[in-house]
Image (cartoon, rainbow, N blue to C red):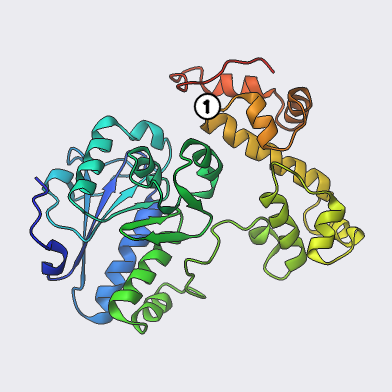
């Protein structure tokens, strides 16, 4: 299987992509990618793209919304492909089996370009196939995976293309990745036509960030507020003072306080604290870091102070959060047991 001619990609009559769907994959990510290819064929009036859905066993994977898509083939029968994309979603750790890792490593050994949508990058990272590559994964998983895979150069961009690795966050961001690829293949005239068909106000590129705090909540016109929130997010481990944030934004502390109170409904210090605690919760649930390590990583001077703040926001301690989530799950390898 996976027999490779001297240059299989150049011999393909058209661009062909295989989407390796994992259990509980995110359907919006897959549909955004596939429909961009479909629309490219329509606007060019040529079948320039083909796509195939695959799984390890050939049976359709059930997406996180409970639906399954057909036809789906076995990855062993995929034939030549320009790129194989791993499509992830929720519970990607359970979906990343030894069989999947072996398949991905086999593809890499045969020099098949690899990509990932949503959390599919976890499987590539686990297989060691993103080491020293710039890569993107959904922002909710970013902090944990930076800890777990320090050799991967994770970026907060919408998508990243680094040599023969094509990684993308979730949601509709795969559409932006595909528009970029289509632009490279078909010229600059085609992507705008696809964008018009999908009623997009603009085509985003690989310099757009996938997650900008408060932007969806307050809109694009409150630049000082969004910049302040972005500074907070970028300084979790060593929190900035409100005076420092105001100086960096270029407004007064009083103005920052007014903006947060009016448009967010919180004083900025409370918003910042809740952001740090939210990051702590991600690390608690997604990594094997000790509670002490998480407290330090999120800017708390001591575990008791961290525990008190955590309980005030979430109603239980960090250790209760971790224990309650994993009562019916296998323990994380290497996890340190603590009571905080």
Answer left or right for 264 relative to 133. right
Answer left or right for 244 relative to 149. right
- Is residue 222 visible in the rendered image? The answer is no
Considering every residue shown, the one lying at the far right of the view is: 254
Residue at 30 percent across and 61 percent down: it is 34
Question: What is the x, y in percent for residue 155?
Answer: 51, 54
According to the picture, the residue beneath numbered tag 1 turns out to be 288
Which quarter of the picture shows residue 184? bottom left
Number of callouts: 1
Question: What is the x, y in percent for residue 94?
Answer: 37, 31
- Is residue 268 visible in the rendered image? The answer is yes
Does residue 233 lie above or below 163 as drawn?
Answer: above
Q: Nearer the viewer, residue 115 or 130?
A: 130
Question: What is the x, y in percent for residue 306?
Answer: 74, 28
Question: What is the x, y in percent for residue 172?
Answer: 45, 60
Answer left or right for 244 relative to 89. right
For the N terminus, which image quadrant?
top left
Residue at 41 percent across and 49 percent down: it is 132
Residue at 64 percent across and 39 percent down: it is 279
For the C terminus, which image quadrant?
top right
Considering every residue shown, the one lying at the far bottom of the view is: 189
Does residue 96 lie above or below 155 as drawn?
Answer: above
Q: Nearer the viewer, residue 180 or 263?
A: 180
Q: Residues within 10 Å of mark 1 (few under 14, many from 20)?
A: many
Disc 1 element? loop
């Amino acid at each position: 299987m996976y027999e490779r001619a001297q240059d299989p990609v150049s011999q393909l009559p058209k661009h062909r992509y295989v989407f390796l769907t994992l259990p509980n994959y995110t359907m919006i990510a897959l549909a955004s990618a596939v429909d961009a290819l479909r629309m490219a064929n329509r606007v060019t009036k040529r079948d320039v793209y083909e796509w195939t859905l695959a799984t390890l066993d050939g049976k359709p994977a059930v997406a996180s919304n409970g639906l399954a898509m057909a036809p789906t083939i076995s990855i062993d029968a995929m034939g030549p492909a320009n790129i194989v994309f791993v499509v992830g979603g929720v519970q990607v750790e359970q979906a990343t089996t030894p069989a999947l890792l072996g398949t991905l490593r086999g593809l890499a050994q045969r020099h098949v370009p690899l990509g990932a949508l949503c959390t599919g990058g976890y499987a590539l990272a686990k297989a060691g196939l993103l080491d020293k590559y710039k890569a993107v994964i959904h922002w909710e998983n970013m902090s944990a995976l930076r800890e777990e895979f320090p050799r991967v150069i994770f970026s907060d961009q919408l998508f990243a293309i680094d040599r023969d690795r094509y990684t993308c966050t979730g949601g509709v961001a795969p559409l932006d990745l595909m528009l970029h690829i289509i632009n490279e293949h078909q010229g600059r005239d085609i992507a705008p036509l696809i964008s018009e068909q999908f009623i997009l106000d603009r085509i985003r590129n690989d310099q757009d960030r996938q997650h900008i705090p408060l932007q969806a909540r307050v809109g694009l016109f409150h630049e000082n507020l969004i910049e302040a929130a972005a500074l907070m997010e970028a300084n979790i481990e060593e929190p900035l003072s409100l005076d420092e944030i105001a100086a960096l934004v270029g407004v007064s502390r009083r103005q920052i306080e007014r903006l947060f109170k009016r448009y967010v409904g919180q004083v900025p210090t409370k918003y910042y604290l809740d952001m740090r605690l939210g990051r702590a919760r991600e690390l608690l649930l997604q990594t094997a870091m000790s509670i002490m390590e998480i407290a330090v990583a999120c800017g708390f001077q001591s575990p008791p102070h961290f525990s008190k703040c955590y309980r005030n926001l979430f109603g239980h301690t960090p250790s209760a959060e971790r224990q309650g989530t994993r009562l019916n799950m296998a323990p994380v390898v290497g996890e340190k047991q603590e009571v905080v």
